[in-house]
């Protein structure tokens, strides 16, 4: 289920991931909010498009793509909480960010 509680939990996880990242370019980044995308609300294939505010000041708008693994897709289809599908934020491989295109992808379990 995508609700305000999930968005806040994801926002906090993104901030932790930036702090734990070995990539110096994003080390000082933080996330100041996650919200639904007005352009494409809901599930498209195995992806959900969101908007996130990211950067050194936390104010640059990024397209945020959630890629749903089997567990996340199953939970989403049953309208269950997806927080447990967010990988460990200590692992730097759970997300990809392109600061030039202002996009970020997160792979959920």
Image (cartoon, rainbow, N blue to C red):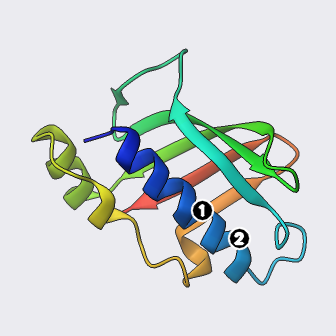
**Where residue 15 appears, x then y in whole percent?**
65, 65
Q: What residue lies at 58% left-to-right and 75% top-to-bottom?
A: 93
Q: Where does label 1 land, which residue? A: 14
Of 90 and 16, the residue lying toward us:
16
Mark 2 burial class by Cα count in 10 Å: few <14, some 14-19, many 20+ = many
Specify the quadrant that holds the N terminus: top left
Q: Residue furthest left?
A: 78
Taking 14 as reference, is 21 above or below it?
below
Q: What residue lies at 34% left-to-right and 33% top-to-bottom?
A: 45
Taking 87 as reference, is 29 above or below it?
above
Q: What residue lies at 80% left-to-right and 62% top-to-bottom?
A: 29
Q: Quick check: marks 1 and 2 in contact, CB under 8 Å?
A: yes
Specify the quadrant that holds the C terminus: bottom left
How many labels sit on residues?
Answer: 2
Q: What residue lies at 37% left-to-right and 49% top-to-bottom?
A: 6
**Where residue 42 appears, x then y in whole percent?**
36, 26
Note whether residue 37 is visible: yes
**Where residue 92 appears, x then y in whole percent?**
62, 78
CA separation in Å, label 1 and label 2: 6 Å
Note whether residue 109 is visible: no
Q: Where does label 2 land, which residue? A: 18
Of 33 and 90, the residue lying toward us:
33
Horizontally, residue 73 falls left or right of residue 28, namely left
**Where residue 58 appears, x then y in whole percent?**
79, 49
Q: Secondary structure at mark 1?
A: helix
Mark 1 burial class by Cα count in 10 Å: few <14, some 14-19, many 20+ = many
Taking 59 as reference, is 71 above or below it?
below
Identify the disc placed on residue 31: none
Q: Secondary structure at mark 2?
A: helix
């Amino acid at each position: 289920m995508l609700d305000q509680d999930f968005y806040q939990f994801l926002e906090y996880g993104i901030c932790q991931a930036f702090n734990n990242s070995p990539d110096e370019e994003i080390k000082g980044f933080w996330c100041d909010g996650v919200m639904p995308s007005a352009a494409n609300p809901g599930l498209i294939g195995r992806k959900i498009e969101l908007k996130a505010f990211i950067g050194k000041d936390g104010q640059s708008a990024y397209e945020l793509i959630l890629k749903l693994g089997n567990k996340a897709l199953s939970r989403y289809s049953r309208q269950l909480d997806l927080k447990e599908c967010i990988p460990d934020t200590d692992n730097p491989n759970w997300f990809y960010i392109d600061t030039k295109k202002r996009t970020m992808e997160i792979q959920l379990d």
